[in-house]
Image (cartoon, rainbow, N blue to C red):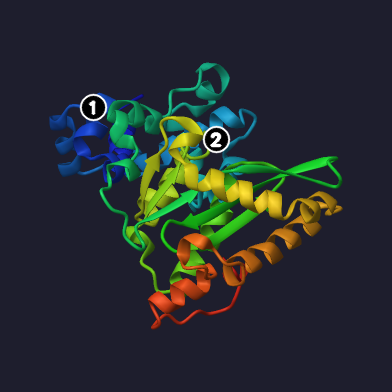
Amino acid sequence: MSTLEKVTWVEQLRTSFGLATALEALQLPKSTWYYHQNQKVDYGEKYASLRPALEEIARQHPAYGYRRTTTELHENYGLKVSQAVVRRLHELWELKLLRSVRPPAPSAIRQAILSAGERANLVATLAEIGWFEVVYTDFSEIRYAHGQAKAYLMPILAHRCKLVYGWAVASQANTALALTAWQAARQRLEELAINYQALIMHHDQDPVYTSHAWAHQLLIHDGLRLSYALHGARDNPEMESFFSRFKSENHSLLWEAPHLTALDAVVTERMGYYNGERRHSTIENLPPLTYLQRRRPTFGVVESGRGEHG
C-alpha cells in the first residue's frame, strides 16, 4: 500500500478509531501524516480518496476497463467522476497490472480493527447508552417459496426504543443491500428529526461492513462511527434476538411468499406491524413508534417512502 493510500485510509478511519490507532494500523508515521495534510496535492493526490474503491473494483471485476469502472464507482460507491478521470487514474496507478497479478490487500479497516483490539467494539466501552446513540444491524437469511429460494434481510434497529429505522431485502447479502437499508434508515431518521451523525452503527466484521464503500458512506459522507463485534453473535445479541422473534413469528408468511417481490412486500407489512402495533415487554408493553412518540411527543412522524414503518 502506497503512502498516499495510507493517508487516505487514515483520514477515513480516524473518526471511529482515533488518529493514533489509525496511524498504527496503517504503519504510517505521524510526521508523514501531517506533511501530507499541509502540502498542495498533485493529480494523484487530488483523487487519492478514489484509490481504495478503484483498487477494490479492479480486484473484484478484473475485466472492467475505465468505462465500466466509472459506472461501478457511481452506482455502488456513490462516487461520481468522469470517465476521463478514471482513465487517467488507471494509467497513473497501473490498475491494469493490479487487475492481472496483484493479490488482494488486507482491508485497511480490518487492520484498524486488529490494531484497536477490544476498543473496536465501541458499544462495549459505553457505561450507558443514550436514546439515539446506538443502532444495530446484521444480515439474516430468509427461506421463501416453500424453501426453494433464499434471500437476505438487513434491518437497522434502535437500541433504546427498538424501532427498526430501515431495512432492505435482496437475493444477496452485499454492499448494495447494506447501502439500500441504510438509505431507508437515514430517511426515517431525518423524518424523526434524529441526528444520525451522532449514531454508532454496531455490527459484525462481515466483508460488507469492512468494505470501502460501506465505510466511505457511513464514516466520511454521513459522519457516523462504526463499532465492530469481536466475538461473533454474542457481541451483537440485540440482532440475534430480533431475528429470532421476527422469523419465528412470521415464519409461515415468509415461507409461503412465492417470489422475491412478494417476500419484500411481506417483510414491509410485518415491519409495519412490528414498529406500529406489536407490543414489546422491554418498552412498557408499547409498540416502538408509540413508545418513541410518548417519550418525545414533539416528534412529527412523516409517513412516506420505504421508511414508512421503519
| Residue 57: mark | 2
Is 186 situated above or below 41? below
Residue drawn at x 62%, y 71% as measured from the top left = 277
Image position of 130 (left or right of 305): left
Residue 85 makes an appearance in the image: no
Task: Tell me the kind of residue under disc 1.
Answer: Glu
Residue 237 makes an appearance in the image: yes
Instruction: Determine which residue is flagged by label 1.
Output: 24
Task: Tell me the kind of residue under disc 2.
Answer: Ile
Can you say which quadrant of the picture contains the C terminus? Answer: bottom right
- Mark 1 Cα shell of 10 Å, populated few (<14), some (14-19), many (≥20): some
Residue drawn at x 40%, y 74% as measured from the top left = 193
Q: Element under label 1? A: helix
Is 154 situated above or below 109? below
Q: Nearer the viewer, residue 70 or 183?
A: 183
Is 59 situated above or below 180? above
Can you say which quadrant of the picture contains the N terminus? Answer: top left
Count of numbered badges drawn on the protein: 2
Q: Position of residue 167 (x, y in %)?
A: 59, 57
Residue drawn at x 62%, y 32% as measured from the top left = 61
Of labels 1 and 2, earlier in sequence is: 1
Specify the quadrant of the image occupied by residue 278. bottom right
